[in-house]
């Protein structure tokens, strides 16, 4: 069972990528699978519990589900759990049946920062984050750090929309940054961030996608900081079918292991 975060399957990024991992597992590993879509945070517990009642493994998609996943996992000790963007050893109560699916976002962010620094004409680039949480901040930190390595005098702007869904909030943040001379905007805000990319398009600036390849949104998308959540989900399901599955630890996905 795959339990989405509130961004849903139409975010063209994080949740959509996780769903692709499940679909790949159904096709290649001959497993049965189902998606439980969370429309609000109050859906987390019932969705996780329903998944655990009917499936051998439950994958929670997102940092915001950390505490609820830990609580539900303790109720179902014989079910294997995986959680995207959460380090299992640091979860509340340290459940032994939850495996962390974590990523080196700073590495993808770094590569996006290099692209932005080499492309900017105004010497000002920016990023729009959703919430100030570790996976978002890792993307932004890598982006800013490597941009400054390429162009030490570059200006890097950042804002948080405080939302992963409402596109108007990210669009407004991006327009403010463009007003401050940013000509490359990196969205790190899931479905909300599609609004930031739209702002870049309307203002004739470059946008950088996140999680999935978002180049299909238009030629204004310079590149995307691809995270391959699908690979993390697929590999965790694959491991879950064997005796080698271990909870209480993390699997880290980065550039080196592709």
Image (cartoon, rainbow, N blue to C red):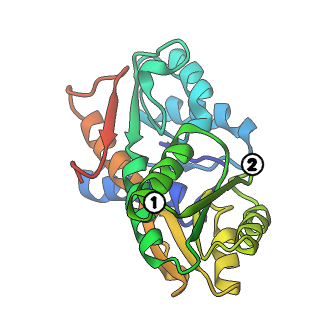
- Residue 59 position in % (x across, y down): 46, 39
Quarter of the C terminus within the rendering: bottom left
The image quadrant of residue 226 is bottom left
Task: Using the image as rendered, state which of residue 225 and residue 10 is in the foreground.
Answer: 225
Residue 3 appears anywhere in the view? no
Q: In the drawing, does residue 107 fall left or right of residue 161?
A: left
Q: Are marks 2 and 1 in contact (CB under 8 Å)?
A: no
Q: Is residue 2 above or below residue 13?
A: above
Q: Is residue 209 above or below residue 211?
A: below
- Residue 229 position in % (x across, y down): 41, 52
Residue drawn at (54%, 38%) of the image: 134
Crowding near pointer 2: few (<14 within 10 Å), some, many (20+)?
Answer: some
Per the image, the residue denoted by label 1 is 152
Q: In the drawing, does residue 61 fall left or right of residue 68?
A: left
Q: Earlier in the sequence, mark 2 or mark 1?
A: 1
Per the image, the residue denoted by label 2 is 162
- Residue 61 position in % (x across, y down): 52, 43
Q: Is residue 72 above or below residue 115?
A: above
Residue drawn at (52%, 55%) of the image: 14
Q: In the drawing, does residue 83 fall left or right of residue 48?
A: left
- Residue 234 position in % (x across, y down): 32, 49
């Amino acid at each position: 069972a795959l339990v989405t975060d509130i961004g849903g399957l139409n975010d063209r990024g994080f949740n959509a990528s996780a769903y692709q991992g499940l679909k790949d597992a159904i096709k290649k590993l001959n497993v049965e699978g189902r998606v439980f879509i969370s429309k609000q945070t109050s859906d987390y517990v019932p969705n996780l519990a329903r998944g655990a009642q009917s499936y051998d493994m439950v994958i929670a998609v997102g940092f915001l589900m950390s505490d609820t996943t830990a609580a539900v996992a303790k109720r179902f000790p014989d079910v294997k759990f995986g959680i995207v963007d959460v380090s299992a050893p640091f979860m509340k109560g340290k459940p032994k049946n939850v495996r962390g699916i974590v990523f080196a976002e700073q590495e993808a962010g770094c590569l996006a920062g290099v692209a932005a620094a080499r492309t900017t004409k105004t010497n000002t680039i920016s990023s729009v984050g959703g919430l100030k949480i570790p996976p978002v901040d890792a993307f932004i930190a890598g982006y800013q750090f490597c941009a400054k390595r390429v162009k030490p005098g570059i200006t890097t702007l950042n804002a948080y929309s405080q939302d992963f869904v409402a596109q108007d909030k990210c669009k407004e943040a991006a327009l403010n940054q463009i007003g401050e001379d940013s000509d490359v905007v990196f969205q790190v805000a899931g479905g909300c961030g599609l609004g930031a990319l739209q702002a870049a398009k309307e203002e004739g600036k470059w946008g950088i996608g996140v999680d999935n390849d978002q180049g299909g949104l238009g030629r204004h998308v310079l590149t995307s900081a691809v995270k391959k959540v699908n690979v993390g989900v697929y590999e965790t399901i694959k491991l879950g079918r064997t005796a080698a599955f271990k909870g209480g630890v993390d699997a880290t996905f980065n550039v080196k292991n592709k």
